[in-house]
Image: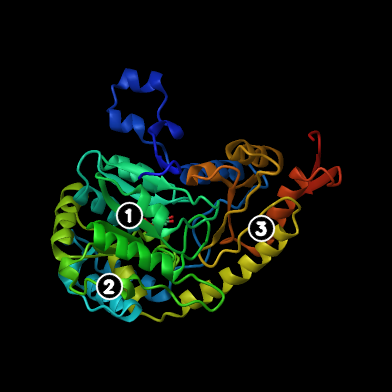
């Protein structure tokens, strides 16, 4: 029985291209159904306002502010210095595959072959070619709410139907039974992202084990999006989905692990991610990638090799900074009357519930940008109204001042005036 709490996501939820525009340009149905990335759009808006000299605080960001590891830069620069920058194999250079094999062995205790690995232009492309490789039209992909904004649109781009499952108890982690209720004849895959963007929640071992078992029983693909796998707090150890699989032979397994250098190594601009899975699937993904974009950019792949094989201390120092930032943000939010917050166990996001102040998260996000120049991503984009995604990957000053500004704007007991730099704001709203 498919429960009432799962949502088959329709394209109308977010802003697609306006109808006047697409009629004149005769755009495809697909193009009309796909929405721009709300987080990238907010980055753009923040950059434009900043350029105009506005005192914007960006709590909507999705990238650490630290620099790429030196080993990444040295490796990349060595290639650039030769001037010999050419096409690469469609599934990645052998040196990067080798580094990924080592990473997989060290982090997951799994020995895989080069044929089990594909490197792509970011985790995003790995997920995209994977969906293209497995989905027939109208097949469904399930993921828990709240979800990363791109999953629904990526599933639609690949011709599939996104199915979001909301926990009945209102928490950020549905039960395995709730996920199982969403499985139907058209279900092809489940995506789990832990720690989760946007909630920061680390799914429990019981939940991940249950979903691995469900996928193996029902012959479904399971995409473990481990983008934030090592950015975890409170002494946790990174979770390892392979621990729960009964299918020990990778070639018979539909478990696929996605990773990237983007967040853990603060290398978002290099655009390198990868997938590890059975070789039939990886070959199909490589064929698709070869026709879509060819192999990822050579300098970026060499940079990723440097990061993966080089000194690893940058991850720990980023992790420690983020844990401290999280503590500061949570403390301030907990002192905010009416706001409900779940302490994130990882990532650099938290997802407080502001519905006591405003239930419409897009309206709230616009209000905060208009009134106090704070960027926050509306929860609606992640499948949960009333929430805002606030990032703690910026500076401590931005975190504290950002939350203080939000509090000033929302809390009716705030003083009447606030200074943003040398600009005096007066509350003319209730
Ligand atoms: C959950 C999740 N998966 C994948 C990605 C994409 O990573 P990349 O920048 O390597 O494409 C992101 C980026 O925000 C993410 O949050």
Q: Position of residue 381 (x, y in %)?
A: 49, 43
Q: Position of residue 390 (x, y in %)?
A: 59, 54
Residue 89, located in which quarter of the rendered image? Answer: bottom left
Q: CA distance from mark 1 to mark 3?
A: 36 Å
* Rendering quadrant holding ligand 1: bottom left
Q: Looking at the image, is 151 positioned above or below residue 316?
A: above
Q: Looking at the image, is 132 positioned above or below residue 28?
A: below
Quadrant showing the C terminus: top right
Disc 2: CA contacts within 10 A as few (<14), some (14-19) or many (>=20): many
Question: Which residue: 52% across, 56% down?
Answer: 172
Quadrant showing the N terminus: top left
- Find residue 100 and name its label: 2
Task: Tell me the residue that label 3 is attached to.
Answer: 398
Question: Which residue: 25% across, 72% down?
Answer: 246
Element assignment for label 2:
helix
Q: Earlier in the sequence, mark 1 or mark 3?
A: 1
- Find residue 166 and name its label: none
Question: Which residue: 72% across, 56% down?
Answer: 401
- In the picture, measured across the screen, residue 133 lies left or right of residue 310, that is left
Compare residues 183 and 132 and report the one nearer the observer.
183
Disc 1: CA contacts within 10 A as few (<14), some (14-19) or many (>=20): many
- In the picture, measured across the screen, residue 239 lies left or right of residue 217, that is right
Q: Earlier in the sequence, mark 1 or mark 2?
A: 2
Q: Position of residue 71 (x, y in %)?
A: 38, 76
Residue 305, located in which quarter of the rendered image? Answer: bottom left
Q: Position of residue 153 (x, y in %)?
A: 36, 42
Q: Nearer the viewer, mark 1 or mark 3?
A: 1
Element assignment for label 3:
helix
Task: Tell me the residue that label 1 is attached to.
Answer: 190
Compare residues 40 and 215 and report the one nearer the observer.
215
Q: In the rendered image, is residue 300 in sight?
A: no
């Amino acid at each position: 029985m498919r429960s009432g709490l799962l949502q088959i996501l329709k394209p109308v939820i977010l802003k697609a291209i306006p109808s006047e525009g697409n009629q004149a340009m005769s755009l495809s149905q697909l193009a009309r159904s796909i929405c721009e990335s709300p987080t990238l759009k907010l980055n753009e808006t923040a950059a434009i306002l900043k350029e105009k000299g506005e005192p914007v605080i960006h709590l909507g960001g999705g990238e650490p502010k630290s620099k790429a590891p030196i080993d990444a830069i040295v490796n990349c620069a060595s290639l650039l210095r030769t001037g010999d920058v050419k096409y690469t194999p469609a599934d990645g250079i052998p040196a990067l595959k080798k580094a990924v094999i080592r990473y997989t062995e060290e982090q997951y205790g799994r020995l895989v072959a080069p044929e089990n690995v594909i490197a792509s232009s970011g985790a995003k492309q790995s997920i995209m070619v994977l969906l293209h490789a497995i989905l027939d039209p109208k097949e469904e992909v399930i993921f828990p709410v709240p979800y990363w904004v791109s999953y629904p649109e990526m599933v639609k781009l690949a011709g599939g139907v996104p199915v979001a499952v909301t926990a009945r108890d209102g928490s950020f982690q549905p039960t395995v039974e709730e996920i199982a209720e969403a499985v139907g004849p058209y279900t092809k895959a489940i995506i789990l992202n832990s720690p989760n963007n946007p909630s920061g929640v680390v799914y429990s071992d019981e939940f991940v084990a249950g979903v691995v078992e469900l996928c193996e029983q029902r012959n479904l693909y399971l995409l473990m999006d481990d983008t934030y796998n090592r950015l975890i707090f409170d002494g946790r150890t990174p979770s390892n989905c392979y621990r729960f699989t009964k299918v020990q032979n990778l070639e018979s397994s539909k478990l696929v692990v996605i990773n990237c250098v983007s967040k853990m190594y603060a290398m978002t601009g290099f655009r390198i991610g990868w997938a590890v899975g059975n070789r039939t699937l990886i070959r199909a993904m490589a064929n698709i990638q070869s026709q879509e974009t060819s192999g990822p950019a050579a300098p970026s792949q060499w940079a990723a090799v440097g990061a993966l094989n080089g000194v690893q201390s940058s991850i720990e120092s980023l992790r420690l900074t983020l844990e401290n930032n999280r503590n500061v943000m949570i403390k301030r939010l907990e002192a905010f009357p009416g706001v409900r917050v779940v302490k994130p166990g990882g990532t650099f996001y938290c997802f407080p519930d502001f519905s006591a102040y405003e239930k419409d998260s897009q309206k709230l996000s616009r209000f905060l940008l208009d009134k106090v120049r704070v960027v926050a991503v509306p929860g609606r984009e992640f499948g949960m109204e009333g929430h805002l995604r606030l990032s703690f990957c910026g500076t401590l000053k931005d975190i504290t001042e950002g939350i203080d500004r939000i509090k000033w704007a929302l809390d009716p007991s705030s003083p009447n005036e606030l200074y943003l730099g040398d600009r005096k704001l007066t509350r003319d709203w209730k």
